[in-house]
Image (cartoon, rainbow, N blue to C red):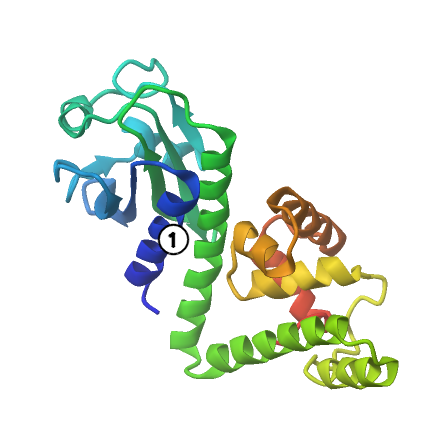
Amino acid sequence: MGEAASVLDALRRIRRSSGVSLAFAGMVSAGRARQTVRLEHFVGATRGALNGVAVDVGHGLGGKVVTVRRPLAVDDYLRTPHITHRYNPIIATEGLGAMAAVPVIVDRSPIAVLYGAVHTDSPLGGRTFDVLADEARALEQRIVADRLSVASPGRDELRDRLTDAYSRLRRLQRSVDDVTLAAEIERIGEGLLDDTPDADPTIRLTQREQDVLVLAALGHSNARIAEELGIGVQTAKGYVKDAMAKLGATTRLEAVVVARRSGLLPG
């Protein structure tokens, strides 16, 4: 899947899960004269005024997000004192009020910005912020995987298939009552893991932490992980954070990489 298709998929999920009236995204590009966020992907109600706009880094909400490298939100874009207002005429044409933006960071550099906006000045809830952040993290992982796939054709696809098979085996193991059969399924699943004798033997994940990490390795958002496992979104987020802490990782992607090197995931 290309980066543009991955971005559009993320925007569709953002709009469906958060309830924003418009989800859109811009890719960060470094031109000779200036670095910009070019807005080119939209899902939802738009009048087209934003399409193709090149947001200068440091200006507007998206430009500030790239500068500070963290999510930001405003309740009333046209009046907030926390951003510059170079793009107010465009936002006014679109009729947008409250807006949130989250950077997508790969190899420590912002490469895109995901936005969620509504046509009122009612504050966006924490649910919208969480959905945007989850999709940004999942998109980071998907883009890295796609780029690695280009560098090593077929390898990433095979790894994802192995990871998916491992996830299915774990679910099957939990669903059977026969102890002998469950043990055999576990043995088959362990055969999909890499033999890494140099891995840190002190790293121990609980069954649920490993379950969420397997699904995170497939690029699933916290909402989808929760749906797959039949648990709450906040519970899923907690397991992901616990796994990251045990693996000494600061991002989901880093946690997946460490887990693979430690023989905890197919890799």
**Residue 59 appears in the figure:** no
Q: Secondary structure at mark 1?
A: helix
Residue 112 at x, y = what percent? 34, 47
Residue 37 at x, y = what percent? 26, 42
The image quadrant that residue 162 belongs to is: bottom right
Judge from the rendering whether residue 25 lies leftward or rightward of residue 102; answer left or right.
left
User: Residue beneath label 1, please?
Assistant: 10
Q: Count the labels in the image.
A: 1
Question: What is the quadrant of the N terminus in the image?
Answer: bottom left
Residue 36 at x, y = what percent? 24, 41
Q: Identify the residue at image location x=19%, y=27%.
A: 91
Judge from the rendering whether residue 178 lies leftward or rightward of residue 79; answer left or right.
right
**Residue 159 appears in the figure:** yes
Q: Amino acid at mark 1?
A: Ala
Q: Is residue 230 above or below residue 59?
A: below
The image quadrant that residue 194 belongs to is: bottom right
Question: What is the quadrant of the C terminus in the image?
Answer: bottom right
Q: Identify the residue at image location x=48%, y=55%.
A: 138
